[in-house]
Amino acid sequence: MSRLNAFLMLLILSWGVSAFAQSPSSGVSVAVSGAAAPPAVVNIWPRIPFTRGKDLCEYHDAYGRTKREQMGELTQTVRSLLREGVDSRNLVALLSAMDDQVNQQRKVASSSPGMDVMLAGSLKAAVDKVYQDRRPQTRRFNFFNPAPLNELLKQLKDPQKQAVWDPQVMRSLSGVAYGTYAYAPTCRGDLLVTLHIDLSCGNTYHFQAQGFPEQVMQSIGQQVFDTFQQTQFPSKIKMGQRSLELLGSPGGAIGRAPSPRSAEMACKAMQARLPTEEEYEYLSNLGDWNGGVTCSRGKLWAMAGNMVMAPDLPNPSPVRSVSEFPGQDFSYYCVR
């Protein structure tokens, strides 16, 4: 059984229902694990189960202050109530009633079903919105339903029914997504959401954001788009009648060097070279979402022969001598 098939079986056994079933009960970060090359187009199972985690609001409310600080706050509350004329004989009952009211409101809010369904739907809508706005030539991340439409309609009709797992159908998928959510420690109605994407090639991707339930997935949707749609190194593109391989730099994607000469030597060590003016221009026109690399303004790009591509200085030519930019660092990537 493949890694993906085994993981899908584990998901179904663990959750037992589709992502539409109810769960029983803006910081931003991205992490990637695995060294394997991801597929050119990633197809993810559209059922995304979200599990509720620890209530960080209650946790910080209980443990975010010392006992001395909690007693101090309680003392101030008692003094304020006495100054307002509250009968001391009813003070304990009043404090208990106030505390019960707060606890009841939190209980009603947390027990209301549907948060997992909303997060899964919001994620798919957020990713699609970014793709509609950016409009890349090729979409590299998809929510793909491999089952026949009649099976999908049955699932929508009865979302509580256990999902049907067919290894033959699942072969067209690249991986699965799942997540967790928790009430954030700010106690102001926002959530801390984590999304995990596991691919059959072995790579795993982890995204996290914090925000209100109706907004938090917009941040994660942008992170997913940036991670899977941006140009990968190494990769190949077609430029006219020839193929150009983008290798990045020895340290990763876009490198930085103290001089064009240093960048040129780094590329030679990779049996590659720096791009020409024509290649820099073409790849910049392709953009970061279509297999190219945008020559960002405010950066200087290293070229062979101790020359520099300066996008901010197009006239009379963006190609300048390094002597015009003393003490500057230079961005670069290698091609072959």
Image (cartoon, grey):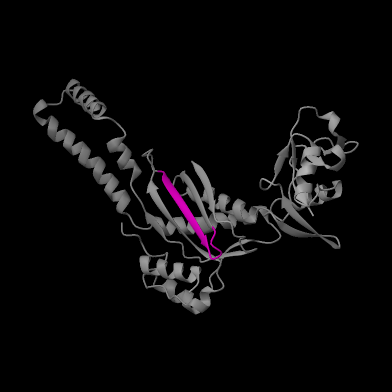
Q: Can the viewer see residue 217? A: yes
Residue drawn at (34%, 41%), measured in percent from left and top?
A: 57
At x 86% / y 63%, what residue is drawn?
A: 241
Answer above or below: position of 291 versus 321: below
Task: Out of 146 and 247, give the one closest to the viewer.
Answer: 247
- Classified by dominant secondary structure, the portion drawn in magenta counts as strand
Give how far across and how far down residue 165 sits, in percent. 44, 75
Q: From this view, report whether residue 123 is shown above or below residue 95.
A: below
Residue visible at 78% across and 35% down in the picture: 259
**Of 29 and 250, which appears nearest the observer?**
250
**In the image, residue 139 lies at what x, y percent?**
65, 61
Q: Nearer the viewer, residue 172 or 213?
A: 172
Q: Position of residue 30 (x, y in %)?
A: 53, 48
| Residue 147 visible at all | no
**Number of callouts in the render?**
0
Q: Is residue 319 magenta?
A: no
Residue closest to the far right: 316
Which quarter of the rendering shows the C terminus?
bottom right
Q: How far across and how far down the image is residue 73, in percent?
A: 25, 26
The residue under the point 81% across, 38% down is: 261
Q: Is residue 275 left or right of residue 77?
A: right
**Residue that extends furthest to the front in the rendered view of this protein:** 269
The residue positioned farthest toward the left in the image shown: 89
**Magenta region includes residue 201:** yes
Query: What span is in magenta?
Result: 190-203
Left or right of 220? Residue 246 is right
